[in-house]
Image (cartoon, grey):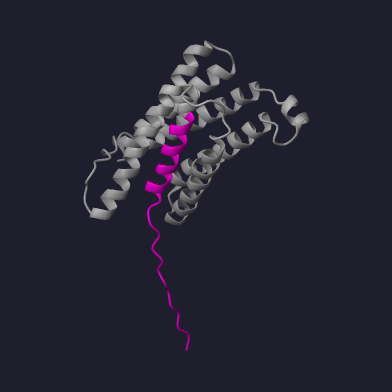
Amino acid sequence: MNQNNHVKIEVADPSGLGLLGLAIVTLVASANKFGIVSGVSLVIPWAIFLGAFVQLIACLNDIKHGNVFGTTAFGGYSFFWFGMAMSWMIQLGVFGEAMRVAADPKAFGFVFLGYLVFTLYMTIGSIETNKTLLIIFILIDFLFIGLAGTAFGIAPHAMHTLAAVSEFAIAMMSFYGSAANVLNKTFGREFLPLGKPLGIFKK
């Protein structure tokens, strides 16, 4: 006699954690862009642990939910922060003088351009999630426009300012999104509204 036992394991929605990671790392990075803090030495730990690892954890848990959008978003930006942290370490000479001298900052421009393309189609996807995420993705679009413009030397002062303001706004909206996800799930009701999807592409 064969007996099959199925155990259902519930996995918590990782959005609150993932957005917290995004909020912290963009807040720290924007402080650097505004010139409030100098250098990236103490930005790197937050890029690795909050920007990269926390969003990777959120990505892996969204995989268990079958959430393609969340998996791609958290995973894509997680590896962005891994890449940024390593790039900053190369520029600081952590991996040796030869790598530091050979580093061409214009390479950042192509990374930022690629991530702008990625963020644009993720922005389209966010239209059918909630308005909070939509605003965050629009702000990320402006961030990558500013970063790419700065890296390629196109109106660098204006582009740097655009990147700094966008990144700070991303942090504030991500704190709100994290709080809403945590408190709404905890209280079992809409404590903080996330905003309904626009309903343009989904019937």
Q: Which residues are magenta?
A: 1-29
Q: Position of residue 60 (x, y in %)?
A: 50, 52
Q: Residue furthest bottom?
A: 1
Near-viewer residue (138 or 117): 138
Q: Residue furthest right?
A: 98
Residue name at image x 42 percent, y 55 percent? 65
Q: Is residue 20 magenta?
A: yes
Q: Nearer the viewer, residue 138 or 89?
A: 89
**Residue at the location (44% across, 35% down)?**
122
Q: In the displayed structure, would residue 48 be above or below residue 186?
A: above
| Displayed quadrant of residue 154 | top right
Assess whether residue 7 is covered by the magenta stretch.
Answer: yes
Instruction: Left or right? Give the position of 169 relative to 106.
Output: left
Which residue is located at x 44 percent, y 51 percent? Answer: 62
- Residue drawn at x 65%, y 22% as measured from the top left: 105
Question: In the picture provided, is 185 more to the left or to the right than 5?
Answer: left
Residue 165 image offset from top left, x and y in percent: 41, 22
